[in-house]
Each structure stands twice: as C-alpha cells, then as structure tokens.
Amino acid sequence: MYTVLTFFAFTAFVAFYSWYKLRKEKLDSKDGYFLGGRSLTGVVIAGSMLLTNISTEHLIGMNGSSYKNGFIIIAWEVTSALALVAAAIYFVPKYLKMGLTTIPQYLEKRFDSTTRTLVALFLMISFIVTLLPIVLYTGAINIESIFNISEVLEVSKEQGLWITVVAIGVLGSVYAIFGGLKAVAVSDTINGYGLLIGGLAVPFIALVSIGDGNPLEGLAKVYNHSPEKFNVVGAKDSVLPFSVLFTGLIINQLYFWSMNQTIIQRALGAKNLVEAQKGLLFTGVLKILVPIIIILPGVIGYYYFGDSLYENQDMIYPELIKNVFPVGLVGIFAAIVMGAVLSTFNSVLNSAATIFSIDVYKRHLGKNSSDKKLVMVGKLTSTILAVFAILVAPMVANAPDGLYQLLQQLNGIFFIPIASIMLAGFFLKRISALGAKAALFVGLAFYILTTFILKVDIHFVHIWGIEFLLNLAVMFGVSYFYPSDKDFNQEDLHIVDLKEWKYTKPMAIALCVVTVLIYIMLGRN
C-alpha cells in the first residue's frame, strides 16, 4: 500500500508542477504548441532529451541485454556523445538559421516537396510500428512487475499487461495532446533528473549491500564474479561486435541525435543557439553517465541471479529493483519509471503531430489553415496514434534478442535511408531530388530484404553501413543522369540569436576524449 501511495504522490506532483508552469502559456499558436514557444533553456533541453531517449526500453531492454552480454552494449550509449558534438557544432546552428519546425522542412528546401512528404510519411510509420508500441509494452512490464497488477485485479498476467498498457497510453496522451511540447519538456525535466538520481541509486544500493556497506568492495565482488561481463570490446559473433563502431553505428547515432524529429525538436525550440548548444552538450555528459543506470544493474543482476533468468532477460531490472529498494522508495522509483515511459511516449506523439500538421496537412489538405486549426489537427493526430500504439503494443512480446535489440533492428528500416539523404543534402551539392527519392526506396527495400526476409549472416549494424554506401552509390548514379536543377542556399530567417556558446568547443573536445578513454580503460579485460 505504501508503494502505491508514494507512486501516486510523485506522479501527482509532476502533473501539478507541469500545470503550474504552463498555466499562462499560449498554446494555440504553431510555435507555442509544437516548439514550446521557442523558449526552452539548456537545462530543460538536456533533461527532456535524456528522458525522451531513456525510457523503459532502455531500463528493461538494455539491462536485460547487459545481464546476458555484459558491457559490450555500451557502444549504443557512449558513441551518442560524439553525435551530440556534431549536432551542437554543425547541424543545429543550420536548423536554427533556417527557422525549421520539422526536419522534413529542410528536405523540401534542399530537394523538393515530394521528398519532404515521403520522409514525413516514413517517420509517421516508424513511430506507429516501432517506437510507440515498444515503449508502451516495456513500461507495462515494469509497472506490472513492481505492483503485481494482475494479482491485485485478479486477472491473468496478459490481461494485467493490457490494462497497464491502456493506462499508460491514456495518461501519456493527455500530456502530449493538451500541453504540447512545453508540457512534455517541463514534466521531462523533473522526471529526467529524478530518473538520473533514482537510476544511480539502484546500482549504488545493490553494491552497498553486496560489499557489506562499501560500494567499491561490492563492485570488486561483482567484477571478480564475472570479469568477462565488464569487457566493452565485442567479439565478431557477439550481440554488438566492436567493428560496428566503424560501419553503421555512427551513421545511426548521427541520425538519431542530429536529425531525428523526436529528439532534435527540443533544440529547435531553444531560446537561442547558446541554450541549444548547452542542452546538446549537457546531454552528451549525461549519456556518458547513463551506462551506470542502464547497463551496470544488468551485470549486478547476473551476480544476484546467475543465469536463472536467461530465458526471460527483460525481467532482470524489475526483479533487481524489488530485491534492493526499500518499500517506500519502490513507489517513488516506479513513478519515475512511469515518467520515463510517458516522456518517450508523449514526445513521440508530439513529434508525430508536428510532422503531420506541418509537413502533410498544411501542405496537402489545408493550405490556408490558421495556427489554431493546425494545433487542433495535431491534437487529433496524437489521439489516433495513441489508440494505434495501445492496440499494437502487446504484439512486440517475446523478442528473441530482447526488446532493445528488436527496437534497433526495426529503427534501421527508416533511420538509415533518411540519414543517407540528409547527410548527402548537407555535404554533397550535386545530389538531385530524384537521386534522393531513389535512395530512400532502394535503401528501404535492401534493408528489409537482407534483415527480415533473406536473413543474411551479417550483423544488422554492418548492414546499415553497407546500405549507407549503397544509398550513396544510387544517389550519385541517378544524379549523374538526372542532375539537380536548383542551387540550395541556406537563408538566415533571424528567428533566434545565433551567437555560439563560448564553451562549445572545449566541452566537445572533452566529450570526445572521455569516449575514447572508456574504450581504452575497459577494453583490456
């Protein structure tokens, strides 16, 4: 009962604080609803970016994977810092200069309106098919496990998960539909830093317990129990070989942190370039710390449970929480975990609503729509997508390599083709609109064929790298025969101040150095 009370108390506090901060906001304008009125600060951007990224597919999926595979999966996290450096120094200054609300807007400026519409539709499908259902399902696993909802309501485990999925889906939708980006970002900030504190507490309390009061002693015991789990350099046949860092992984990271609407929308809503760069680089610092929250607990779980949960790896994190947390803290941490689920869910809903309203509806269905009408369309889009996600969520159960690995495999369907044409747009002036469109479809077909139909015996991240090169070849080939007939000029719309933050370059260098050091120090095991 105490767990339930603390859970509801913390959830209510976040909701009240978000309402209080938003009560005077103008949410019926396009910028107000979709970009938080272009008023977001670095701290809010970093907190919101972290929580939009880190949800239960990380807490459950990555801890489940590290329980089985060890620290080799750290590459997903620490290489993010390099991509965030690229976003802060190169990409976001260009986006703010152009006054973008969505990433597909850039594609129209660089290529043509059809490319913009195609990518907008690709993104909408990826949100519905991959991210939203997995976020909902992993959230439901955690909440069901902590509160034993199926036992309390005297229903089957499957029914308990369904009920939890619906509850999370409805609650997350309320934030996104009624509050827009600002509501999402404000609630994310509290939950984001709560997740950081609560998430760090899980391994700390566990190590204190294992080390009889000394966490370092506890860490030594966990290390001596299975030193191979601390190695960050994956073998060729492992779940994440070290070589993928130099093929498809960096392309994926560049896309995710520099071009993904769900993430970069926070930086697009920044007050100025200084706050955008602060937010991006602070997020880089947090991503270096995040493995302590989403990888170390899984390895500690191996110390506690051995290989008894190998067939059910996605249960390791909920079991560890129940094992190490005092009863009162379980409720608060469950509320923070719930916040992480809601954050990613409502962030994706808000981004999907933004893309549909600005890139599809305004251009094809209601060209003269007022801001008020666009906001209404955005709210309706969020509602429909939320219902779809709730219906699809239980279908993602029983992923053979764990839910996080499934999410990454599905992401590759859309991320790599879009990343290819975005990077070509920025760096290769001769690529034409027809070349970009051809690469989108060739890349899509190639990845689905090699990963899900023929199942080629190459790691899917290497396939990302091969696909990227194939897409470039297609773009060069088509553009040679059908060259671009327009010059792209990035005009400055003077919407926000573009003066650079004075610590951008020192912080960028520090993040790159720390990333390399992690591999040097932990690659010797």
Image (cartoon, rainbow, N blue to C red):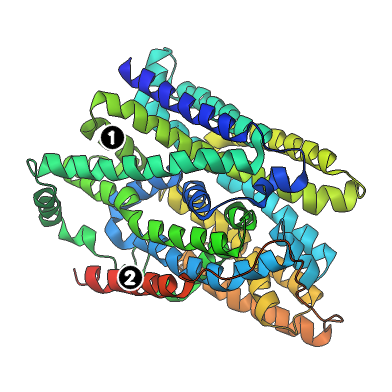
Answer with left or right where residue 170 lies relative to residue 396: right
The residue sitting at 62% across, 60% down in the picture is 272
Residue type for callout 2? Val
The image quarter containing residue 467 is: bottom right
> Which quadrant is the C terminus positioned in?
bottom left
Q: Which residue occupies the foreground of this view, 322 or 48?
A: 48
Point out which mark residue 214 bears: none
197 versus 227 height, above or below: above
Q: Where is residue 28, by image quadrant?
A: top right
The reply, left or right, for residue 13 in relation to residue 292 is right
Check disc 1 and report its element: helix, strand or loop: helix
Q: Where is residue 452 in the image (x, y as percent from the top left)?
A: 56, 57
Could you tell me if residue 326 is visible in this image?
yes
Q: Residue 514 carries which label?
A: 2
Q: Where is residue 330 in the image (x, y as percent from the top left)?
A: 31, 28
Q: Which of 392 and 318 is in front in this view?
A: 318
Q: What element carries label 2?
A: helix
Rendered location of residue 81, percent (x, y): 43, 65
Image quadrant occupied by the N terminus? top left
Q: Residue, x 26% and y 74% (percent of image)?
A: 520
In the displayed structure, 91 sits above or below 409; it is: below
The residue indicated by pointer 1 is: 321
